Amino acid sequence: MTRIVVVDDHPSIAKGTIIERRLQELGEVAIYTSLATKPELLIERLRDAEVAIVERTSSRVTAEVLAHASRLKHIAVYGIGVDNVDLDYCRKRSIMVTNTPGYSAPVVAEAAIALALAVLRRIPQYDDRVRAGLWQDPGQAPGQLYGKTLGVVGTGNIGAATARLGLAHGMKVIAWTLHPSAERARELGIEYVSLEDLMRTADVVSISLRHTPQSEKLINGRLLGLMKPTAVLVNTARGPIVDQEALVEVLRQRRIRGAGLDVFTPEPLPAGHPLCEMDNVVLSPHIAAATPEMALAGMGMAVDNIRNALEGHPTHVVA
Amino acid sequence: MAHIVAVDDHPIVIKGSPFEPALRELGELTIYNSLANKPELLIERLRDADAAVVQHVSSRVTAEVLEQARRLKLIAVFGVGVDMVDVATCRRRGILVTNTPGANAAAVAEGAITLALAVARKVPLVDRLTRQGAWPQGEPITQLCGKTLGVVGTGNIGRRVAEIGKGLGMKVIAWTFHPSEGRARELGVSYVPLAELMQTADVVSINVRRSADTEKLISRKLIGLLKPTAILVNTSRGAVVDEEALVEALQQKRILGAGLDVYAVEPLPKGHPLAALDNVVLFPHNVAMTPETNLATLEMMTANIRSALAGKPVNIVA
């Protein structure tokens, strides 16, 4: 019987749910309900595993870890980004890696817009003020999306959904992608520009790229320096796409209005990190797609990927 | 020359704006840069005024205040709601009251959606816990996409809320005093009875003006109909909702939460029960106070004063 291990079900979305029951139809199931942030934990949990479900970016499935997982045949990642898995090593060992693309795009886009609004309207700061018995603050006028320009970096499923939400909010939308096409621009009702122009022009910049060697620190200090003093940066993709040190510096010097961040380098964001002290950021713990509906849909897709691979016609194969 | 008095320009909107010179061309302009939240302040400021500019609901232009404003001919309200003005007394005295409909619709509707998202995603709580290093991935959050939005009132603001809601992938239902099929088709919403809206919607957004008809329109009984997963958003006026009943529903967690920009008493008094709840997100009646909206509202308000002084008033409420 196939041994299936969920290595990091925390917070729990598999244990005791329909997901666990569906997995049990496919094999012998072990679900660990804590994070696997240390290599030795992951090595221990993967010892006898043939199929692994990896939910969290803090589970780093490195070559060292994989060297100990001699029976492993398939890593089913819950989510889109697989940057926490050593894909080259998996290819060499013929370990299949699958992901769960597409379904969460409208909700991640919703989270990106929510973060932009949270920064512009200073939600945490104003909520604190009102609770403390204070009222409107002349020096802290709220900002709005309506009439402004949204710059979307990356126009895959999530970037396209973010562009649509920007249009619904009465924004002009510009975008950048590695491979722009006039047809895609027409279809989305947006305009492709150079990354420099996007950073210079946009009032809200939203990052919707996958994390690859090419996108690592793509949003560097030079590009951050081009942003308008009134601009807001939103990142719901992956922390390493942005030069986080440079971003902290730009925020500290108030050279942009603020940032709404769901992703960081590293994760979990350590207590005492400089970002935690800033009044021009809004932070969330990589939960853009963590609604009950999305957890069920995403884990359901991961289970489908496992069943399909076991039946010999694998789906959503990344490596 | 007409004496124009801005009774409560705080936070400062008029002073230093492009419309200050325009107002000075229309008359002698006096700007007070503090709230006028006491009758004696307002009486003093309006003593010699021919025209008054009123920005905040805390400036209560009551019959008592009007009694002492002998020269007053025009009250130009900066905003849509004129519930801070005793309109009946104004009518009797022949004092014209104008407002600025539509100028703030985009910002207020966006503010309503902001509050709904903030409650659904627990933005302030999650932000605080993340700053403390707690990495609160287990904090239950929810999404608006795929849910039902109930819009109470489909004037300029309500219809814009409906538009954004549809953009977010929500089904939109609505209630108004005077529903029509044409209006429903035009907006792409279906009108339902208020009780049905309260029972069905995942997000209820209040966008009616305050009047005798809407005072506590969202009653204890109607609040009791809300789903345990529902979010109530109010960006219109505090008095439209039975605030005591809402606080109880929130304390007993009979609804998911509330996003509030307006309150029964403003500023919200220190120590108010709402301030102790973790299922609310609170704004200080500022969803319309973006720089862009301030300018659009000022432009319309200045035009209202110009037209009224020229004997051809527009945007008349009373």
Image: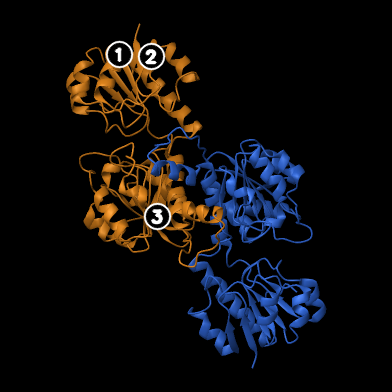
Same subunit, labels 1 and 2: the answer reads yes
Residue neighbourhood size for the residue with mark 1, other residues' Cα within 10 Å, grouped as few (<14), some (14–19), many (≥20): many
Disc 2 residue type (three-letter): Ala
Per the image, label 3 sits on a secondary structure element best described as loop
Image location (x, y in percent) of residue B252: 66, 37
Per the image, label 1 sits on a secondary structure element best described as loop
Q: CA distance from mark 3 to mark 2?
A: 43 Å
State the mark number for residue A141. none
In what quadrant of the picture does the N terminus of chain A appear? Answer: top left
State the mark number for residue A279. 3
In terms of depth relative to the viewer, which is nearer, B137 or B33?
B33
State the mark number for residue A30. 2
Image location (x, y in percent) of residue B31: 57, 81
The chain to which mark 1 is attached is A
**First of labels 1, 2 by sequence position:** 2
Q: Which residue is mark 1?
A: A49
Task: Evaluate whether residue B84 shows in this view.
Answer: yes
